[in-house]
Image (cartoon, rainbow, N blue to C red):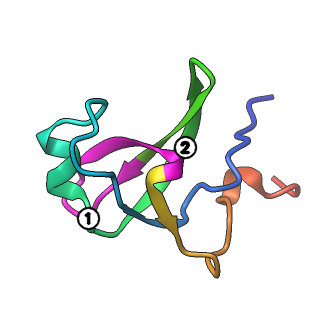
Amino acid sequence: MHRHNTPLRGVKAVPKPAEGNPDYTDVHYRYAGRAGNIHEVVEIDGRKLAKVGFPDRKIVYYFLDDLELDGTAKRGTFHDDESS
């Protein structure tokens, strides 16, 4: 059975990357400060990256530590519902 294990899926996130970070490009800074929603979190080389979707359907990956998360948001989606 295929299960998603993304407890932050759907959570509103606002990217706040530090200026001059060589890990980010112009696209990252263009979307900085805009609200999006986390689609999934992946780990690469020991660092967690969040796939963030924005209202214009653009997807941008940010380091999880560089996101301001909505602490009141419901976590998960129907994929995470135990009854499905």
Front-lying residue, 37 or 22: 22
> Quick one: which residue is furthest to the bottom in this view?
72
Report the residue at 18% width, 36% height from top. Answer: 25
Magenta segment, which residues?
A: 52-65
Q: Which residue is mark 2?
A: 40
* Rendered location of residue 1, percent (x, y): 81, 28
The answer to whether residue 13 is left or right of residue 18 is right
Give, as a three-letter code, the residue at label 2. Answer: Glu
The answer to whether residue 58 is left or right of residue 8 is left
> Quick one: which residue is furthest to the right in this view?
82
Question: Disc 2 to disc 1, how far (Cα)?
Answer: 16 Å
- Quarter residue 54 falls in: bottom left
* Rendered location of residue 40, percent (x, y): 55, 43
Q: Any mark on residue 39, and which?
A: none
Q: Is residue 37 magenta?
A: no
Q: Quick one: label 1, few (<14), some, or many (20+) residues within 10 Å?
A: few
Q: Which residue is mark 1?
A: 55
Give, as a three-letter code, the residue at label 1. Answer: Pro
Q: Quick one: label 2, few (<14), some, or many (20+) residues within 10 Å?
A: many
Report the residue at 21% width, 42% height from top. Answer: 20
